[in-house]
Image (cartoon, rainbow, N blue to C red):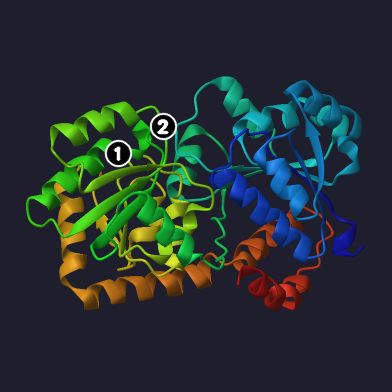
Amino acid sequence: MHSKSVRILELNFERGWRGGERQTMYTMSGFRDAGLNVELLCRKNYPLEKKANEKGFKTQSFANIFGALFFLIFKGNRYDVLHAQSSHILTYAILSKPFHRAKIIFTRRVDFVPHGKMTLFKYKLTDQVVAISNAIKRILTDFGAKDVRLISSAIMAKKLDKARAEEILRDAGVNPELHLIGTTAALVQHKDPLTMIEAIRELATVRRDFVFLHFGKGELEQQMRDKIAEYGLEDVYKLMGFYENVEDIFSVLDIFTMSSEQEGLGSSVLDAFMYRVPVVSTNAGGLSDLVQGGRAVSCEIHQPEQLAAGIQSLLEEPLKRESVARRAFAYTTERHSLTCITRSYLELLHEMGTRIDLNVVEKIAPKMQTTQA
């Protein structure tokens, strides 16, 4: 039977639009390019449904989780494979398994340690657990999950709107002649933004010819504002808030940074790699897969002095900036292309007994590369 006959239902019931939702869309695009019949089960009237519909995907959307559960019970047998993109929706794929009897794949994207016998039982009933980084794979294996497969995340470059990025800078009163350093990270504890403030305070004792742009929102915002004011950093540390299509800012950044204390992989770092912006980052969790091998300046977590020294070294050494960015770009296009990640999933599906034609990936690779441009 041809690959086209293989029916896959992607499951993502999240309300927001973050890395996992973007990866869900990439996975669907890769499967469709490979000739598979792919649909999406998602939450009604939220960004993922809207973006999937815009891309021409068939969606099964529901206002609440019970609608999704009833669909899986009564209609889930239409599909050969259910691919859960979060632990929450995996629960309902497992609960309905006696009815749909489809193969279940779960891709885990966070490096929080799972707990409880029920969670372990859920993993044991999953046909294949996938981890997007070695850090997550180690956590799941230690927890008791069997035969965890490592398949990382895809990154697809888009044409950046530099004019829009420059407009964002103007609106924020940022002098574009300064060195522009930035991050795209939620203002939440596992991103450790307070360590970033300490790092920028350290850097500001050495130089003031830069501005730091922090894109994101979150519960630590007021605490950060207070700390920025306490240190007198209002002129160099700008809380930019949330922007749609924030990737445009990579067109003007000189350096990208990450201060995370926990990270499943770090797709923002992959973005920086793809857009040739040199990176200074902690090696937390899955970031350690990315920042090794001279592809970034790697730092330990909770070490603002290391972050500051890393930024300073890149500002002082143009050749180092160029070398870091070049290695990172080469790695990303080779190891994190849509073709590469889709091929890994198709090989997995083939091993699981679905009727996948593995030759199809080689045929559609040029099409995928075109899609990325």
Q: Amino acid at mark 1?
A: Pro
- Choose between 278 and 76: the one closer to the eye: 278
Expressed as whole percent of the image width and height from the top left, the position of residue 319 reads 23, 78
Q: Amino acid at mark 2?
A: Gly
Q: Does residue 277 appear to the left or right of 234 in the view shown?
A: right
Q: Does residue 8 appear to the left or right of 276 in the view shown?
A: right
- Which corner quadrant of the image does residue 370 belong to? bottom right
> Dot 2: within a 10 Å radius of its alpha carbon, few (fewer than 14), some, or many (20 or more) residues?
few
- Choose between 302 and 279: the one closer to the eye: 279
Question: Mark 1 and mark 2 in contact (Cβ < 8 Å)?
Answer: yes
Q: Is residue 35 above or below residue 363?
A: above
Task: Give the foreground label among 2 and 1.
Answer: 2
Expressed as whole percent of the image width and height from the top left, the position of residue 119 reads 58, 26
Asked if one can make out residue 83 in the rendered structure from this viewpoint, the answer is no
- Which corner quadrant of the image does residue 264 belong to? top left
> Dot 1: within a 10 Å radius of its alpha carbon, few (fewer than 14), some, or many (20 or more) residues?
many
Instruction: List the residue tagged with mark 1.
Output: 193
- Choose between 209 and 307: the one closer to the eye: 209
- Which corner quadrant of the image does residue 10 belong to? top right
Q: Secondary structure at mark 1?
A: helix
Image quarter (top left, top right, bottom left or bottom right) of the N terminus: bottom right
**Mark sitting on residue 18:** none
Instruction: List the residue tagged with mark 2.
Output: 218
- Give the CA separation, mark 2 to mark 1: 10 Å
Q: Secondary structure at mark 2?
A: loop
Asked if one can make out residue 312 in the rendered structure from this viewpoint, the answer is yes
Expressed as whole percent of the image width and height from the top left, the position of residue 159 reads 55, 68
Image quarter (top left, top right, bottom left or bottom right) of the C terminus: bottom right
